[in-house]
Every structure is written in structure tokens, then in C-alpha cells.
Image: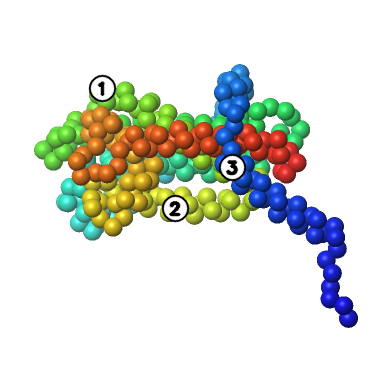
Amino acid sequence: MGTPHTPPTLEIQANADESSSVQVWRRFFIFDVHFVSNLARLWHNRYLIFALTQRGVRARYKQSLIGIGWALITPLAMTAVFTYMYSALGLEGRKTFPCPPVLYLLFTLSFWNFLTRAITNGSTALVSNMDLVTKVYFPREVLPISSVLTNVVDLVFSFLLWAGVAAGYSYLRPGVAFSYPHAYPFLPHAGWLWLPVIFFFHLLLILGIVFITATLQVYFRDVGHLINLGLTLWLIITPVLYAIGAFSGGRYTTLINLNPMTGIIDGYRLAIISRASPWYTAPNWEHHVVGSVLFSVWIFLVGYSFFKHEEQYFADVV
């Protein structure tokens, strides 16, 4: 008996699929020369982004008993668990946090939960709206952008929750001022003006990642599993559940400092909790907020260019 022979049509299809995958990765490194015109076209469709974002917010809390309360339950529950854990292990007395641990955890978890939800939702924006992608013409980046902006509402409410708890500490626990003089009182001050600036670069970082993951998920559906794994590992090397000052000169200090979210989280902390300039870096810290800002701009440029290069193939592949 002769050896089994693969039909020519199957070989051609396999080669085509393989070459298509290779082309995807090659186009990833090509910068879009029409970047400015694409942004101008996107600005022209800003009302569409607003409409889709509004629809996403309504759909998320439609027929929900708690509604927007879910934006508060998640950070509160995680804060309660980790605060109890730190208390049980005796870590609260080490003063490694720039403020009471409950305030630090509630503060950082609000911004981290925004990142995880935005990346998770934004990465599936194209495959979840395949009817729009295949039948209606519009700038496809509108879908992941609106998916990301939908989570801003949750961030606003969780941050207001932190502000309320922090204000309660200022009035109900005045003795905290002796333990954390640089952060007391926990009330609005001039440093809060840095909040929209840092949030802008935080948003650029998320959008750049979402443009890449949303594009790759059109071609490879298992990207979603890698995103969940990556976010879990990313949390470990980000100063969310611990203060950045707790790791100074340790084995993993370099990895933590190279993490772009380290500068973003610490920028929020410096401006709002520590009442310092976000561009300040302590002498024994290697990381600087400027590094995260530059990386956020770079990843946004690369991600958006990659997305626009692949946009013409979405309708055929999805």
C-alpha cells in the first residue's frame, strides 16, 4: 500500500494559513504612516464612541439588583480580605505602606480593577460584535475604545468610595497623623490636579494593549486565555497588594521597576496620597514615572498602528 497523500487543496490551505499567521506578526512591527489621518477620522466619529459607551454602561447594569454597586463590592471585598491577612500576619506594624493598609489597598485596587476589566472587555470587542464588523462600515477601533471607556464609570465610583473612606479616617481617626504625617489628612489637595494627567497615560497604556489583543484574538481565539494568565502574573509584579518601598534592592526589584504599571500606580500614590510630584523618585528607587509615561505612549502608537494595518482583514477572518 502506498503512503497516504495529503490532497493538494489541503496543503495549499495549510500553507496559506501558516503564511497568514506569519504576516500578522510581521505587520506588527510596521508603523502606520497614516497615523495622524486615522486619529482625525477617529475624532470625527467621537459621537459614535460616546453612543456605544453609553449603550455598554446601560447593558452592563440592566436588570441588575445591585447595579452600580458591583463597582464598589469588588474592591471592598478584596480590600477586606487582604487587610485581614496583613493583620493576621502582623505586617501592619512594619509601616511599609505610605498610609493605613486599608486605604492603600482600596486605592490601588480601584485602578488595577479598571485595568483588568478594560483589557478583558476590550480584547473581545471585535469578536463579540462580528455582525457590525462584517456588515457595517465604520472605524473598527471604535469598538475596543468604547469597551474600555465603559469601565471608567466603575473607576469613578470606586475612587469616590476611597475618597469617602479616606475622609472618614481624617475625622474619625486623627491619631493616624502621627503614624503617616506625609499623607495626613486624607482630603483633596493640589496634588489631585495630577489625577487626570496620570489617568490619561494609564488609558493610553490600556488602549495600546487592547488594540493588540483585540486584533490577535480575531486570528487566535486562545488569546483570551493568555490574557487572563498574563493579568494574574502582572498583578504579582505590580505594587498593588504591597508598597513599592517594601522591595528595595531585592531579587525582583528590577522586574518590578521595569513594569509600566509600577510607575502608573506609584504616580497616583505620589500625587494623591504622599502629596508629592509624580515625577519625583526617591534616591533608592530605580523606577521613575516618566518611564511608564514614555512606554504608555509607545505601546499606544504600536498597538494602534498594528490595529489599523489589520483592519482590512477583520471582515474576512471574523
Mark 3 vs mark 2: in front = 3
3 to the left or right of 154: right
Q: Position of residue 137 (x, y in %)?
A: 72, 28
C-alpha span from label 1 to label 2: 34 Å
Marked residue nearer the N-terminal end (1 or 2)? 1
* Residue assigned mark 3: 28
Q: Pick whichever of labels 3 and 1 is earlier in the sequence.
A: 3
Q: CA distance from mark 3 to mark 1?
A: 41 Å
Q: Residues within 10 Å of mark 2 (few under 14, many from 20)?
A: few
Mark 3 vs 1: CB contact within 8 A: no
**Within-10-Å neighbours for mark 1: few <14, some 14–19, many 20+:** few
Quarter of the image with the C terminus is top right
Report how far apart the C-alphas of labels 3 and 2 lie in the structure.
25 Å
Say what secondary structure mark 1 lies in. helix
Left or right of residue 83: residue 318? right
Give coordinates of residue 3: x percent, y percent: 84, 76
Quadrant in the picture for residue 5: bottom right
Q: Residue furthest right?
A: 1
Residue 73 visible (yes or no): no
- What residue sits 31% from the left and 23% below the top? 193
Residue 105: give x, y in percent of width and height.
31, 44
Q: Which label sits on residue 232?
A: 2
Q: Which residue is mark 1?
A: 190
Residue 212's disc is none
